[in-house]
Amino acid sequence: MASSSSLTLLAPTSSSSSSPPNCERHVFPSFHGADVRKSFLSHVLKELRSKGIDLFLDNDMERSKSIGPELVEAIRGSRIAIVLLSKNYASSTWCLNELAEIIKCRERFGQTVIPLFYELDPTDVKKQTGDFGKVFLKTCKGKAHEDIQRWKCALTEVAQITGYHSTNWKTEANMIEDIATEVSNKLNLSAPSSDFDYLVGIESQMTRMRPFLQLDSDDVRKIGIWGPPGIGKTIVARSLFNRYSQDFQLSVFIDNIKTKYAIPASSDDYSVKLYLQKQLMSQLTNETGISISHLGVVKDRLRDKKVLVVLDDVDHLVQLEAMAKETYWFGPGSRIIVTTQDQRVLKASGINHIHRVKLPSYGEALQMFCMYAFDQKYPKDGFEKLCCEVVNLVGRLPLGIKVMGSYFRGMSEQDSTEALPRLKAHLDRDGEIANILKFSYDALNDEDKRLVLHIACFFNGERNGMVESCLEKSFEDVRQGLRVLSEKSLISIENRWIYMDKLLVQLGKQVVRKESVSEPGKRQFLIDAIDIGEVLHDDKAGSSSVIGISFEHTEAITWTGERSFERLSNLQFLKIHGHGINPKSMNYMSRKLRVLDWRKFNMSCFPSNFNPEFLVELRMTDSSLEKLWEGNKPLSNLKRMDLSSSRRLKELPDLSTATNLYDLNLNCCSSLLTLPSSIGSAINLKYLDLCLCSSLVELPSSMRNLRKLSRLVLYKCSKLEVVLANINLESLEELDLSGCSLAKSCTESSTEIEELDPW
């Protein structure tokens, strides 16, 4: 069972307390005065008042068979109800109606109920037996059946709530002191909090968490809260703890475990587990000098206790094995909540109830920033553009929004405008965000660190299959590496596309820059226009370290020379969407190139010496190409070719060696006249898009060899007369023939077309 939701920050919301609305009093006591008023009850009330606890007493109310609106309001307006059950409690319909209303408030509002069984067996209350049952039976005579059933349900329910039994205590004084302390602690926990005033969406978070918690069940449950660093996992867990901890006998929130209780490399697991168990038991029981000599202590001490344990920011399985390995260590109804950015830790510990915290929407992120910057959910006049720019700059990570909002807090419009360029150059000036993200990065092994840098600098927003193909020769197991990064929430893989948060991308780029601050040619990746221009213009710079260049479309550099790529002998990944790079520099392109993505390439043909032997992906969209190259070139590694919107393209090269090509996009290649017969050699081709190839006249008969072709788009190929016999229909799942004409000789194949799914 899993869920996902986003955490957002907005205008202050109502208290996260589980109490009924408009709580005016701390405690409502329900009791039978004749039994306890002058003795036990008076001592309880005195002890509660001594702790500053506000009580409602109905001494001045006129007693009747039913309770009036004022009393109902008093019950609902109290955070805690104490039910003092004595031998004659059930003799009063007033008391029984009070109890029924209290139980209703518990179920509806989550009101805390503490039963006190005074010289009474809880079983007699639950089953209405013994002397208590006789009194109840007498009260029921002549009463409506509905009322009797309501009272029975209330008595049964209250008897099952953990409370105090006077017969279990040596002295009443000790019991009363303990009662007062518990009430005080529960009130402190349930007090209206301003800790989460900036949170919007916390109530929906609680709603999504409720099916996992199953608080009415006596089962022991372990629940995971999973998401990337800085997304708000701890806030969700803290809010849960504040809301529900008073319903447990013992509760503890152990925060920042990854940092506070880091696992030393040289230590053995047993010693680590003993230490962690000691920390758990010490904080849970408030015993500072507790001694743990073996790993059975948690089970021995807690197996009959209903506990709430929150383990925040766990990053090693040994931490969970020490503090919450088995559910039977804890008493019925216990809940163990674990926050982590590593899903593998949860799965390895057998935690199947996992709640994934996702990024907020853009609008929510904007409101979040405004709350931190302006104490309101919308921008101040004159700050609208600034707010949008900051959110676009840092992405939607709540931590980043918080830090940036706090940075701009109190600034004038002019100061903010002047600060923004500096912020773009030196994001996260105080390092608060970077420190958290860097901690996660540093915890990776060297192979996974390299993969993070490749994604941050080049492959963010790419298909995972393409990334695997491009990097399979650079990494031992790139698929496993991607899985690790996903499970550690450093990337997300959605519908087979890889995404990395903007702030983590920023961190990755900073790591690469620090490889050589003053000499960019000695870095793995070049990503800034200034650095790219410096390296491509420097004829003397030794640049064999550079394996990737990502030049975005918003940037421009001074026009480069024809030999600018000559020294980049190890260049493997090239993306050019900006302006200023001389297309004739293709004459000196590295033979090791795996990805070539050059938008608006302004030459009619590649140079004759271009070698695509290791090329995996070729993207030349919106280019001036009329053809790619002359002759037959080695294309055995090529998997995807995208020439879409290359409106001057008239022909494709020989594809005899393109046996692994699976995606060919020729969308809007309006001058394309024909496909080469060698396309039949592309036996792994799955996707062929010829949409708006308005000059295309026919399809080669060799296309019958494409037995894996699943999608064929021929939309508005207006001159094309489709001969179905030339197409292998068996594997097709999508076929778009809109705007084409079918050859008359192929009407016998019409039944096969009907069997295909329409595009």
Image (cartoon, rainbow, N blue to C red):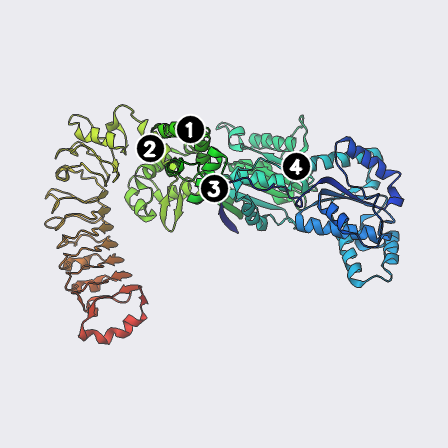
Query: Which image quadrant for residue 404?
Result: top left
Question: Marks 3 and 4: in contact by CB < 8 Å?
Answer: no
Name the amino acid, label 3.
Gly
Q: Earlier in the sequence, mark 4 or mark 2?
A: 4
Say what amino acid the circle numbered 4 marks: Leu
Single out the mark in the foreground, 1 or 4. Answer: 1
Query: In the image, which is nearer the foreground, mark 2 or mark 1?
Result: 1
Q: Position of residue 528 (x, y in %)?
A: 27, 32
Label 1 with label 4: CB-CB less than 8 Å: no
User: Which residue corresponds to mark 3?
Assistant: 227
User: In the image, what residue type sits under mark 1?
Assistant: Ser
Compared to residue 43, the image places residue 5 above or below, namely below
Q: Which three-letter amino acid code belongs to the residue tagged 2?
A: Lys
- Label 1: state its secondary structure: loop
* Mark 1 vs mark 4, CA separation in Å: 39 Å
Identity of the residue drawn at 62% across and 50% down? 214
Q: Position of residue 369 (x, y in %)?
A: 45, 37
